[in-house]
Each structure stands twice: as structure tokens, then as C-alpha cells.
Image (cartoon, rainbow, N blue to C red):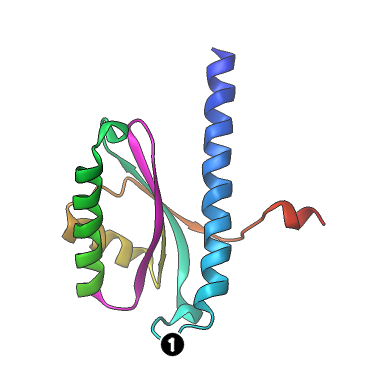
């Protein structure tokens, strides 16, 4: 059991590290963008409980992505999807948005669960150790 717990902790750590690194890269790229108001946007990690998410086909994932993008386009520049991580029964998504309410609105309009929404306060990486 401890081995499974360790593997799970390692997986979660890798996902969070990758999410934080993606956020840092996106922050660097979007700071020069004039299409998004990044000064007032916060970064959120969304946990979506989706049974058998890891078994979704590429076509199903494409459909989910297209639905999300169409809702985001409708909602305007106050919310942005950065990327997502698909696991066995969950999808973890990283978004930038002006508020948690916009994340909930996106989930409702898209028909996606948003079981846990966590605002990311600080991003760290191996560079933080230097």
C-alpha cells in the first residue's frame, strides 16, 4: 500500500510541477499579449472527476477540447485555458481567469464538472532553489 501511495504522491507532484512550469511559461508569453488582460487574471487548478477519463479516445478528447474552446470564445477574454492533464478518473486543468466564478460558469456552460477549484498563489520550480 505504501508503494501505491508513494507512486500516487509522485504522480501528483509531477502534475503540479508540470502545471506550474506551464503557468510560468504562459505568464512569460502572455505578458506581451494585448488580447488578454493578464494583470487582473489569476491562475487556477481545476480538478474534474470524470470516471474512466484515462480511457477517453483521441476523438473524445478532441470533442471535449472543442466544446471548451467554443465556450471560452463565447465568454470573452476574462478566462483562458492553458492546458489539462488526463489521469485515470480525473482531468486536472490549468486556467487563467479573473475569478473563480468564471471557472464555474465555464464548467456549467460546457457541461464539465469542476469538483475542486484551487487558486495558485505562487509558482515554484527548480530555479527557486537557486
The vertical placement of 17 against 24, above or below, is above
The residue lying toward the viewer, choosing from 21 and 46, is 21
The vertical placement of 129 against 30, above or below, is above
The residue lying toward the viewer, choosing from 117 and 86, is 86
Which span of residues is magenta-colored? 75-92
Whether residue 68 sits left or right of residue 34 in the image: it is left
Q: Residue at x 36, y 68 (%)?
A: 80
Quadrant occupied by the C terminus? bottom right
Crowd tier of the residue under label 1, counting other residues whose Cα lies within 10 Å: few below 14, some 14–19, many 20 or above: few
Give the secondary structure at mark 1.
Answer: loop
Residue 119 in the image: state x and y as whole percent. 48, 58
Q: Which residue appears farthest toward the front when viewing the image?
A: 58
Residue 54 in the image: state x and y as whole percent. 32, 33
Whether residue 65 sits left or right of residue 3 in the image: it is left
Circle count:
1
Q: Which residue appears farthest toward the bottom when viewing the image?
A: 34
Q: Residue at x 58, y 32 (%)?
A: 10
Whether residue 93 sits left or right of residue 125 in the image: it is left
The vertical placement of 50 against 67, above or below, is above
Magenta span contains residue 38: no
Residue 101 in the image: state x and y as whole percent. 31, 65
Name the residue tied to disc 1: 34
Q: Secondary structure of the magenta portion, mostly?
A: strand
Residue 105 in the image: state x and y as whole percent. 24, 63
Q: Which residue appears farthest toward the top when viewing the image?
A: 1
Q: Residue at x 47, y 83 (%)?
A: 33
Amino acid at each position: 500500500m505504501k508503494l501505491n501511495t508513494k507512486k500516487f504522491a509522485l504522480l501528483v507532484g509531477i502534475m503540479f510541477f508540470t502545471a506550474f512550469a506551464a503557468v510560468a511559461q504562459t505568464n512569460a508569453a502572455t505578458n506581451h499579449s494585448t488580447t488578454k488582460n493578464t494583470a487582473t487574471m489569476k491562475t487556477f487548478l481545476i480538478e474534474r472527476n470524470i470516471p474512466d477519463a484515462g480511457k477517453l479516445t483521441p476523438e473524445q478528447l478532441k470533442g471535449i477540447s472543442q466544446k471548451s474552446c467554443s465556450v471560452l470564445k463565447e465568454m470573452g477574454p476574462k478566462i483562458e485555458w492553458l492546458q489539462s492533464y488526463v489521469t485515470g478518473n480525473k482531468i486536472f486543468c490549468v486556467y487563467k481567469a479573473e475569478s473563480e466564478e468564471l471557472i464555474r460558469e465555464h464548467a456549467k456552460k460546457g457541461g464539465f464538472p469542476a469538483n475542486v477549484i484551487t487558486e495558485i498563489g505562487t509558482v515554484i520550480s527548480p530555479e527557486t532553489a537557486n
